[in-house]
Amino acid sequence: MSNIRYSVVVPAFRENGNLRPLVTRIFGALSQVNSPVPAQEVEVIVVDDNSRDGSVETVEQLRREGYNVRIIVRTTERGLSSAVVRGFREAQGDNMLCMDADLQHPPEYVPAMLASMSPTKQFALGTRYAKGVEIDEGWPLYRRVISSGARMLALPLTSASDPMSGFFGIRKETFLKARNLNSQGFKIALDLLVKCQIPNDAIAEVPFSFGVRTEGESKLSGKVILRYLEQLAELYWYRFSAIIVFLVILFFILFVLMARALLSSYGGLDSKAQSKY
């Protein structure tokens, strides 16, 4: 029987330069005396979209050095959200964490994120918007504006402080409740928060300071932003479809009643006009 209780899923594409420091820092943090989670109970799963940049060889070398890490190479699928879903489905642990490979999610926060999940806390959210937390000053202004705008658009869907965060965890049994996940979506955390119907009091928020990418390239593009807007539209329909249908029906009924009233009014005026002659 496996003694793995925690799984860290890392979606990656051309992130070979970051994999070694990421894995060694994760297990370094878990090996600290004050770590709330034992290193031997944790696995790291890299889900790579066929980068062909040496990532497979790096992971194999890390395994030979004793790190509990494995890599899944996808050749027919692409995209961050679907990579996270694939990793969660293959995870051995009951407590699953997603984090970026670019070191913008500091590995030193992994123990706290994993430990924050429990039967009563189904979702762990690394938040950049807690009191006293600042996004790294090297983060471009346009990225800050995009992040804040995306967060505001999601407010009607969840009260979570940072639903745009890619640093989040979820319990396995909660993840398995999700239906119709958007594999092409921009933010899988938001999708899970809505479609797993996670109550506000079941979210554990862990403040963290966002870092700056040191290797590889950002995946943010106009196409990704457009996909996020499409994802928002789909989530709004998923959450509020019954209300939208009700409002449409109500509008139709009011329209019919108003039309009848106007027709009756005009009919009455016509009758009066004819009676004069």
Image (cartoon, rainbow, N blue to C red):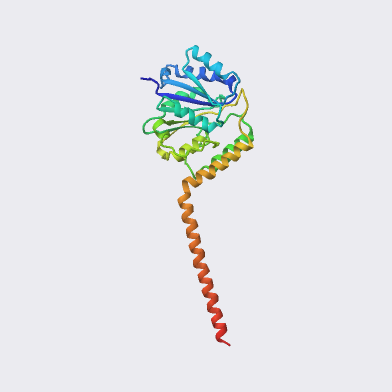
- Does residue 99 appear in this view? yes
Q: At 61% across and 33% down in the image, what residue appears?
A: 220
Picture coordinates of residue 254, whole percent (x, y): 49, 63
Judging depth in this view, the residue of 55 and 228 nearest the camera is: 55
Answer yes or no: is residue 167 visible: no
Image: 96 above or below 180? above
- Residue lying at the far bottom of the rendered structure: 277
Q: Residue furthest front?
A: 76
Question: Residue 57 location, x and y as percent?
Answer: 56, 16
Q: Identify the image quadrant of the N terminus.
A: top left
Camera-side residue of 44 and 203 = 44
Q: Residue at x 47, y 49 (%)?
A: 241
Could you tell me residue 88's position as x and y percent? 46, 29
Q: Please tell me which residue is depicted at 52% across the width and 44% down the height of the picture.
A: 234
Q: Is residue 269 above or below residue 19?
A: below
The count of marks equals 0
Q: Nearer the viewer, residue 248 or 145?
A: 248
Residue lying farthest top? 65
Quarter of the C terminus within the rendering:
bottom right
User: Residue 236 in the image: x percent, y percent?
Assistant: 50, 46
